Amino acid sequence: MEQLVIRDADVVDGSGGPSYRADVVIDGGRITAIVQEAAAAGCQRPRAVRELDAEGLVLAPGFIDMHAHSDLALLRDPDHSAKAAQGVTLEVIGQDGLSYAPVDDRTLAEVRRAITGWNGYGDDIDFTWRTVGEYLDRLDQGIAVNAAYLIPQGTVRMLAVGWEDREATPGELDRMRRLVAEGLEQGAVGMSSGLTYTPGMYAKDAELTELCRVVAEYGGYYCPHHRSYGAGALEAYAEMVALARTAGCPLHLAHATMNFGVNAGRAPELLALLDDALAAGADISLDTYPYTPGSTTLAALLPSWASEGGPEAILRRLADPATAEGIRHDLEVTGADGCHGVPVDWDTVEISGVSDPALAGYVGTTVRQAADRRGEEPWVTARRLLVEDRLGPTILQHVGHEENVRAIMRHRVHTGGSDGILQGAKPHPRAYGTFPHYLGRYVRELGVLSLEECVAHLTARPAARLRLPDRGLVREGYRADLVLFDPATVAAGAGLERPRALPTGIPYVLVDGRFVIEDGRRTDVLAGRAVRRTAR
């Protein structure tokens, strides 16, 4: 007898086609039969050890978060309800060019410091791995949801070149090629870049193109956080499209937004650029989160010259009054490259988290509000926070535009990504709410997407980008990574005031045919594993 039958579900299978009513049979972690209502008429219905009545619920493939920052959270937090409760069954980590493999002892310490605002410093993690393969093996010991890994180009450059703003030597470039190839051979699905983050941003296009050629050779894809989402956004998108086409490498544009005042209403220009490239044969996809604020670290706003040399060099420059004044001028007057070429508006920069509990009073205030309370200029407050918290503060940056968000999510190559930073006392609600927010707000309330379209954006389309032959659809033989939700009530509980509230209307989530969410509560199941690159 089969292990589980999900009875009378409204199946939205991920293809984008119309829903249908069916019994879905699961055994051995896979879907073994789908018996549609018409076919079941007059026939004996499938039986199993357990039968789940899904009357009134939609059964869909598990959601794939194409841009996640759970690199340490998956190891630290077995519960991981932030994602499991949303119906996410697979996350893509190693994003924005900075993560924890491949590393050596020196670069591990450096990257831990550099992205402590994203993931915490990791005092509670046993960093026994050094290679991509060893990190994936660590994930295979059991995690809440599945995870795929992108080789972080900034970390690779850290290993081969260091933190200097210069071109790589031929020998250094050869080493980077080997590191990327080794990571792909060990199971990474592609390569990411953070081209407004050091040291990855110091790479010129020719260097990135050479690394992308290696990625293409192994059947992976390139996922850049490109050089500007502000003053030079369209040019930065065009740069990545041209680079990927030159390298013959599939391109996935990370958190593909058009932010800051200079880009209000300009999403159609981006989409026209992509349509032209797609019509010419380019292989492009993108992800977005359904919110207007962005989220990053406060240190990320600094000009690249101030970040050269790594975290300790940044702190030395901030401690020097003359150098700090130069940083302020670039931020407030010129428009630092770390702030996307736009002069910073401290009214839009909200402190969302700090590493030092003694600084918790800053959380939830904008930099300007905090400065006004102290009777000082905003830069003085920002500099104080960076130094006292040793680059730890995370921020929300309120610079997005709703019309751009809606236009981009309609595009035929769009997928969903939370870009969820789980650190801090007041993280961005996208970390806990992205996927139910799509379904509740943009499907049910606003009708921006139909339910069938939205599910396809969140399941089959990302599975295709990841080259996963047995995920992303409700099909016989496919893995039983599934979500059951109530289309009338599904909604994000998380908001700006309660950013860690869990969603409503998602009572069941299965990973590998096992319930990780049951009756709306997290079980103790750790069925997730590393999802490795599929060979060509």
Image (cartoon, rainbow, N blue to C red):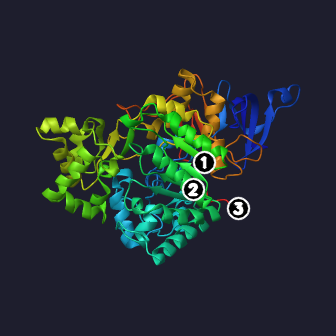
Q: Quadrant of residue 343?
A: top left
From the viewer's perspective, is residue 285 above or below residue 501?
A: below
Q: Which x, y percent locates residue 428?
A: 39, 39
308 or 182: nearer the eye? 308
In this rendering, position of residue 21 left or right of residue 424? right
Q: Quadrant of the N terminus?
A: top right
Q: CA distance from mark 3 to mark 2?
A: 19 Å
User: Pointer 3: what residue?
Assistant: 536
Residue 212, position in %: x, y? 56, 62
Tell which circle, 3 or 1, labels the residue nearer the N-terminal end: 1
Q: Which residue, given by chain and number where applicable, does mark 2 sit on?
A: 244
> What is the total number of numbered labels drawn onto the structure image?
3
Q: CA distance from mark 3 to mark 1?
A: 18 Å
Residue 152: where, in percent of width, then height? 48, 60
Ranked by sequence position, the earlier of labels 2 and 1 is: 2
Quadrant housing residue 399:
top left
User: Decide: marks 2, 1 in contact (CB < 8 A)?
Assistant: yes
Mark nearest the camera among 3 and 1 is 1
Amino acid at circle 1: Ile
Give how far across and how far down residue 301 sits, in percent.
Answer: 31, 49
Within 10 Å of disc 1 (Cα), the crowding (few <14, some 14-19, many 20+) is many
Can residue 143 be seen?
Answer: no
Q: Secondary structure at mark 1?
A: strand
**Is residue 448 visible in this depiction of the protein?**
yes
Looking at the rendered structure, the kind of residue marked 2 is: Ala
Q: Amino acid at mark 3?
A: Arg
Residue under pointer 1: 284
